[in-house]
Amino acid sequence: MRYTQTTLKKLEGLFDELDYSIRYEKGNFQSGYCIVENRRIAVVNKFFDTEARINCLLEILSSLEFDPENLSDAARELIQKSRKS
């Protein structure tokens, strides 16, 4: 998987399909992000570069429970690419 702005936008679209909002904020995050489960919000450190943001979103994605069959083909393809990396 390439760490580009396009990849970041695709991941943000995937989170949108999962009904999660992504916010880039400053804060004291131990791992660079936090998840507000009951509001379906992922907050990522706004000072991270593109690569770190992508890595955070991939880490968050791996911890979420969802049915890939409910996602678009492009989203499922993105998930498969992220798991191969």
Image (cartoon, grey):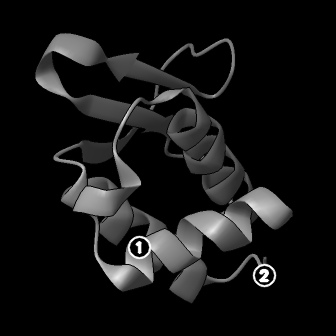
41 in relation to 9, above or below: above
Q: Position of residue 84 (x, y in %)?
A: 83, 65
Task: Say which of marks 1 and 2 sits in front.
Answer: 1
- Amino acid type indicated by mark 1: Ala
From the viewer's perspective, tell me whether residue 85 is left or right of residue 4.
right
Quadrant into which the C terminus falls? bottom right
Residue sitting at 56 percent across and 13 percent down?
28
Spatial CA span between label 1 and label 2: 16 Å
Frontmost residue, 68 versus 32: 68
Residue 75 placement (x, y as % from top left): 41, 73
Question: Could you tell me if residue 19 is visible in this image?
Answer: yes
- Residue occupying the point 35% across, 39% down: 66
Q: Which residue is mark 2?
A: 2
Q: Up-down: is 70 above or below 31?
A: below
| Disc 1, SS | helix
Whichever of labels 1 and 2 marks the residue nearer the N terminus, that label is: 2
In the picture, residue 1 is in which quadrant?
bottom right
Residue at the (53%, 87%) spot, across then down: 6
- Residue 48: tell me if it is visible: no
Quarter of the rendering containing residue 72: bottom left
Residue at (31%, 70%) from the top-left corner?
13
Side (left or right) of 54 relative to 3: left
Q: Amino acid at mark 2?
A: Arg
Which residue corresponds to mark 1? 75
